Amino acid sequence: MSLKRRLPFLRWSFLRMATGARNITTTGQIGDGREAAAVDYVLANARPGDIDDVLARIDEFAYEKSLLINIGDEKGALLDAAVRRANPALALELGTYCGYSALRIARAAPSARVYSIELAEANAVNARQIWAHAGVADRITCVVGTIGDDGRTLDALTARHGFAAGGLDFLFIDHDKDAYLTDLQSILDRGWLHPGAIVVADNVKVPGAPRYREYMQAQQGTRWDTIEHRTHVEYQSLLHDLVLESTYLGG
Ligand SMILES: C[S@@+](CC[C@H](N)C(=O)[O-])C[C@H]1O[C@@H](n2cnc3c(N)ncnc32)[C@H](O)[C@@H]1O
């Protein structure tokens, strides 16, 4: 593995990302146009209709051009395995960004309908282009909104997309780290998750979702059964991260 891959701190795009951290929380993008550039790169270089190639080109862009805040290849393999274990007909994701993880979910569950909630319209526009290029636009839907918007997005999922009690098999949480627990609780309040459904949460160590982790630890063996996967922050192998994979036990 090249030094550049091992140590992202040596890359200009990492430094630009560090200075753009505030943009991510307000606009959902780093602020230097890298997300649109990633879409252009995929459309120019990935074989149309080939999910594997689209994902590989996104990873290539993140390693070789500009870092992206996708789940990435290493943690993505953990996501794939959890999706295969859940074998979902219906999957929900919080945090679309460029559409990378939704594409991984759709690949690991070839007959699933995948919904992804994203606060930034610009990210929805980008992700839809990538999904269309991969040939799965009919199976992945981006809904612009947030779970915390006084029920508007949750109501839209029910009224327009058929979300109903016990119908959600898989949930991937990868958006605002401070909203992980409250948004999970809002989804639980709707009764969509059934016993045996699986919830995966990224970035539990970096940037960190400590209240979510404490909640899962406190509920271990009663309401949830959680595996903590020790792994690395996306697109490098120095910083450690945690991905939590939790099976809902009901109650
Ligand atoms: C880490 S990125 C998601 C990466 C994506 N899941 C992947 O691996 O390809 C986080 C995304 O969540 C979005 N976001 C932030 N807060 C949100 C919220 N409260 N609801 C929905 N999306 C949110 C951001 O705009 C950003 O696109």
Image (cartoon, grey):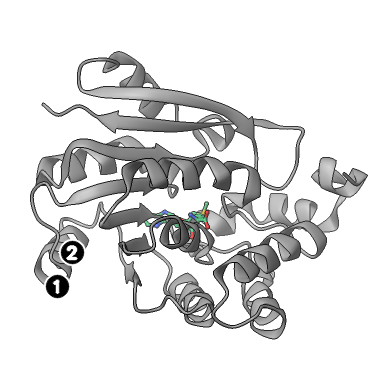
Q: Position of residue 61 (x, y in %)?
A: 74, 65
The picture places residue 3, in percent across and down from the top left corner, at 91, 44
Q: Residues within 10 Å of mark 2 (few under 14, many from 20)?
A: some
Determine which quarter of the picture holds residue 65.
bottom right
Queried on whether the Cβ of the residue with tag 2 lies below 8 angstroms from ligand 1, the answer reads no
Q: Which mark is residue 247?
A: none
Q: Which residue is mark 2?
A: 157
Which amino acid is tagged 2?
Leu
- Please name the amino acid that badge 1 sits on: Arg
Q: Is residue 237 above or below residue 50?
A: above
Kindly check if marks 2 and 1 are in contact, taking CB atoms under 8 A apart as contact: yes
| Mark 1 crowd level (few <14, some 14–19, many ≥20, 10 Å Cα) | few
Assign a secondary structure to mark 1. Answer: helix
Under circle 2, the secondary element is helix
| Of 195 and 162, the residue lying toward us | 195
Point 32% across, 43% down: residue? 86
Mark 1 sits on what residue? Answer: 160
Q: How many labels, in total?
A: 2
Q: CA distance from mark 2 to mark 1?
A: 6 Å
Tell me where residue 237 sits by quadrant.
top right
- In the rendering, at what x and y percent does residue 119 appear? 38, 63
